[in-house]
């Protein structure tokens, strides 16, 4: 698939997610619906018209290009100074998280009951940290890629990671959209490496869905957590078997049980 085909596919996907029909797009662009259909069928879209479609979708052209590429670009990191500032101020960290999920400032204030002075202070600080660009009428634009990764040894994960994981696992997983499955098996090195790669791809796919769905209105999105983990581990319950006195055995049954014990794992 060529780059132009990827752009058009991304546009079609976004239009479907927004519930925008070809007829709606035609009215917004002052064109006929057959013209819109021919444009997408032929794959030839003028740059100016493409910009207008992005405006209808409230989407920056470069964001569209990133969505069309999927997750091709390497994920970046914040500077140590930026992470330290976020780690030290929970309100600042939350506002930054919401900005990365494309929340409008008005929605942040309404949802969390922030007064205007507090909101402006937090946005101005994010602007000074070069994490966002604060625009007129308190509109914001991210200055960093939304799919960045926190530093593994950085201050944000050091301060919040363990608490977040404990809180995440403490909740119930009984709902329709919840999945929790713990498996403990013995695997070889090749299988472990294969599964690790698959989990990395799953995490990348999670990020890709977040990139696509960030263009949806906030009322059509829900906060979802996904914890991906794989490591060599022995459940401490197995220690209950170590050093336990063997039960007394007698007769033929005892000899048979002893034989199974010594020959099995």
Image (tube, rainbow, N blue to C red):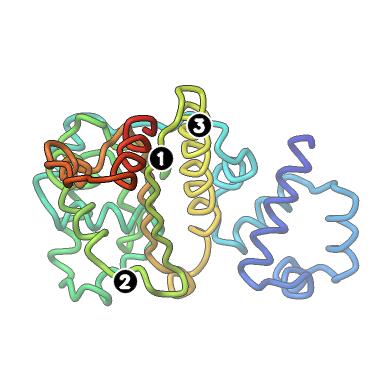
Q: Residue at x 22, y 47 (%)?
A: 126
Which residue is farthest top? 189
* Residue 175 to residue 153: above or below: below
**Could you tell me residue 218's position as x and y percent?**
43, 70
Residue 210: percent from the left, percent from the top? Answer: 48, 53
For the residues marked 1 and 3, what is the alpha-carbon distance in whole angstroms? Answer: 18 Å
Front residue of 76 and 231: 231
Judge whether 68 appears above or below 38 on screen: above
Residue 185: mark = 1
Residue at left offset 22%, top offset 42%: 238
Tag 2, which secondary structure? helix
Q: Is residue 25 left or right of residue 93?
A: right
Tag 3 secondary structure: helix
Residue 197 bears which disc, if any? 3
Most distant residue in the front direction: 251
- Mark 2 and mark 1: span between their CA atoms? 49 Å
Q: Residues within 10 Å of mark 1 (few under 14, many from 20)?
A: few
Give the number of the disc on residue 106: 2
How many other residues sit within 10 Å of disc 3, few (<14), some (14-19) or many (≥20)?
A: few
């Amino acid at each position: 698939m060529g780059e132009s085909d990827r752009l058009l596919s991304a546009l079609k996907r976004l239009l479907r997610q927004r519930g925008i029909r070809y007829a709606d797009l035609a009215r917004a662009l002052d064109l006929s619906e057959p013209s819109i259909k021919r444009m997408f069928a032929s794959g030839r879209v003028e740059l100016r018209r493409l910009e207008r479609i992005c405006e209808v979708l409230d989407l920056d052209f470069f964001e569209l290009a990133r969505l069309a590429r999927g997750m091709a670009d390497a994920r970046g990191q914040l500077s140590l100074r930026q992470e330290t500032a976020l780690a030290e101020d929970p309100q600042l960290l939350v506002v930054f998280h919401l900005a990365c999920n494309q929340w409008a400032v008005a929605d942040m204030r309404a949802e969390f009951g922030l007064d205007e002075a507090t909101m402006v202070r937090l946005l101005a600080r994010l602007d000074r940290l070069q994490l966002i660009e604060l625009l007129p009428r308190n509109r914001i634009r991210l200055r960093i890629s939304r799919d960045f990764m926190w530093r593994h040894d950085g201050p944000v994960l050091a301060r919040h990671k363990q608490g977040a994981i404990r809180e995440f696992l403490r909740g119930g997983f009984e709902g329709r959209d919840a999945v929790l499955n713990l498996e403990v098996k013995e695997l070889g090195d090749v299988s472990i490496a294969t599964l690790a790669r698959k989990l990395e791809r799953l995490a990348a796919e999670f990020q890709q869905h977040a990139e696509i769905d960030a263009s949806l209105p906030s009322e059509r999105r829900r906060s979802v957590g996904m914890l991906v983990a794989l490591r060599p581990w022995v459940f401490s319950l197995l220690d209950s078997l170590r050093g336990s006195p063997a039960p007394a055995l007698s007769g033929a049954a005892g000899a048979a049980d002893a034989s199974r014990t010594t020959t099995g794992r």
